[in-house]
Image (cartoon, grey):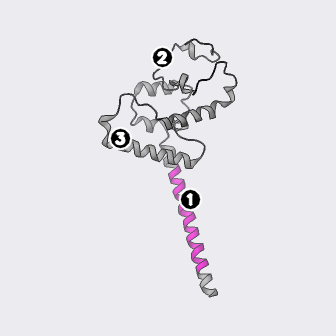
Amino acid sequence: MKGLLQKLDKKLMLFTLIGVFVGIAFFATTDGAINATDTPEFCASCHMYESTIENFNASNHATLNCNDCHAPTDSKIARYTFKAKNAISHGYMATFGASKLPDVIHATEKSMEVIEKNCISCHEPGLQNISHDAKDSCMDCHRQVPHNKGDFRPAEWFEPGNFEFNR
């Protein structure tokens, strides 16, 4: 009986070590692939809107990757799950629904929640300096950031500290 337990312990140890090694290898390669699919170059390979890309590259956000804003950043599990769902959706639309794609693509409700949370996460230190009443969401006034879609206000409106405005 004691010999059987030692054999089981050795097998269990071997399988545990193999599992840990496979897990580390999978995580390391997956993490690299996930990071590669965050880049503006990768996203632009399908989202080919030249003006959007040009505006993004000229914005203060140009040092970020797309998914710094467009995917959860609070945990890798949330990020990977979100990106996997988006990859399935993007793959389906590219394969079967390309003819149904609208000219202008809008973020889903879930995507808007993620973007809003990421805006607040990065900009939280400056939020106490806002001198106007906050709307329900940052996107209510700043939807064009950094893609410059939809809201074409004069450049002066976007200058830092210019928070007094009339609608």
Give residue 24's mark: 1
Q: Are marks 3 and 1 in contact (CB under 8 Å)?
A: no
- Expressed as whole percent of the image width and height from the top left, the position of residue 26 reads 51, 57
Q: Amino acid at mark 2?
A: Phe
Give residue 152's mark: 2
| Measured Cα–Cα span from mark 2 to mark 3 | 29 Å
* Discs 3/1, front: 3
Q: In terms of depth relative to the viewer, which is nearer, 36 or 119?
A: 119
Compared to 138, does 113 lie above or below? below
- Expressed as whole percent of the image width and height from the top left, the position of residue 80 reads 52, 48
Helix, strand or loop: magenta stretch: helix
Left or right for 64, reference 47: right
| Magenta stretch bounds | 8-31
Q: Amino acid at mark 3?
A: Met
Q: Which residue is mark 3?
A: 93
* Discs 2/1, front: 2
Quarter in which the N terminus is drawn: bottom right
Q: Residue at x 63, y 16 (%)?
A: 163
Q: Amino acid at mark 1?
A: Ile
Whichever of labels 2 and 1 marks the residue nearer the N terminus, that label is 1
Question: How many other residues sit within 10 Å of disc 3, few (<14), some (14-19) or many (≥20)?
Answer: some
Quarter in which the C terminus is drawn: top right
| Measured Cα–Cα span from mark 3 to mark 1 | 32 Å
Question: How many other residues sit within 10 Å of disc 1, few (<14), some (14-19) or many (≥20)?
Answer: few
